[in-house]
Image (tube, rainbow, N blue to C red):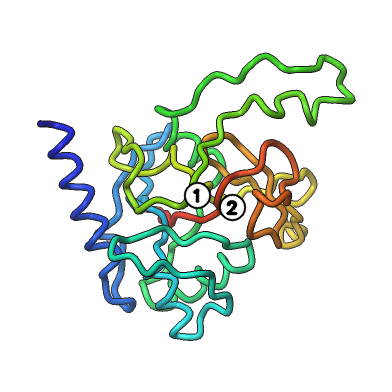
Amino acid sequence: MLRAATAIVIGVLVVSWAGLPHDASLREHMVGVRMADGHVLLVSPVEVTVAEWSLCVKDRGCSHSPKASDLPAPYPVTAINWFDVNEYLRWTNMRRGGGLRLPTREEWLWLGRSFIKPKPAPLFTDPRLAWASEYGQENSPGGPVRPSAAFSTSPDGISDLDGNVWEWTMTCAVSGFAGKQAGYCPAYFAEGAHEAAIPVFERNPAAGGCATGTPPTHLGFRLVADE
């Protein structure tokens, strides 16, 4: 009974989220999550959808037009690189009240804390092979992109954190890129079933474009905002 009620609530959130007019603020549809330090972060219940991305393309805010789903249910947009994400952020903040952004790595890990599993023992102890010490042991849910809210929902009410779409974060995966150098970061963390460092130009890491770790299956993103 509880699972059925939760599914109904998430379904309503997904439909209302994808069908909102593109000039409206989305904050009232976001879920407030209390973070580890006590502050509340507003989080979209699902990843940015194909329908939302299509609005950006139609409005000429986004130059990249990935393959769209023609199915009736909302689907997360995928095949999105770092530059695509930032085009969308500029566009959506102009039309939705501002303040929308990607989560940091630490914020995402807190949101997904109920799904994170202990890391397996490393394959190699030689520090020269540290980059490959976990390769092949990480859980990577595969398959085609599934409808929004098709995977689990966290106790906080956030869906698909354990799905097969990894999500860009705003945290640089390479040390030394901070302050004035931040805009030159070559790779950012993408979070999902496991952590991956993704080069900024990569749209399809499953084809081999992953800086470290097992490549994610699909690559998308989720919006957050400070309360």
Image vertical order of residue 182 relative to residue 142, above or below: below
Q: Earlier in the sequence, mark 1 or mark 2?
A: 1
Q: Position of residue 10 (x, y in %)?
A: 23, 48
Residue at the spot of label 2: 170
The residue at 54%/70% (across/down) is: 66
The residue at 33%/45% (across/down) is: 150
The residue at 21%/52% (across/down) is: 11
Circle 1 packing at 10 Å, graded few (<14), some (14-19), many (20+), is many
The residue at 77%/43% (across/down) is: 175
Could you say which quadrant of the image residue 173 lies in? top right
Q: Which mark is residue 103?
A: 1
Residues at circles 1 and 2 in contact by the CB criterion of under 8 Å: yes
In the image, 37: left or right of 82?
A: left
In the image, 173: left or right of 142?
A: right
> Split into 4 quadrants, where in the image is the N terminus?
top left
Q: Is residue 93 visible?
A: no
Q: Which mark is residue 180?
A: none
Q: Position of residue 70 (x, y in %)?
A: 37, 69
Q: Position of residue 122 (x, y in %)?
A: 72, 17
Image vertical order of residue 95 relative to residue 75, above or below: below
C-alpha distance separating marks 1 and 2? 6 Å
Q: Position of residue 20 (x, y in %)?
A: 26, 71
In the image, 209: left or right of 192?
A: right
Question: How many marks overall?
Answer: 2
Q: Amino acid at mark 1?
A: Pro
Q: Secondary structure at mark 2?
A: strand
Q: Secondary structure at mark 1?
A: loop
Q: Amino acid at mark 2?
A: Met
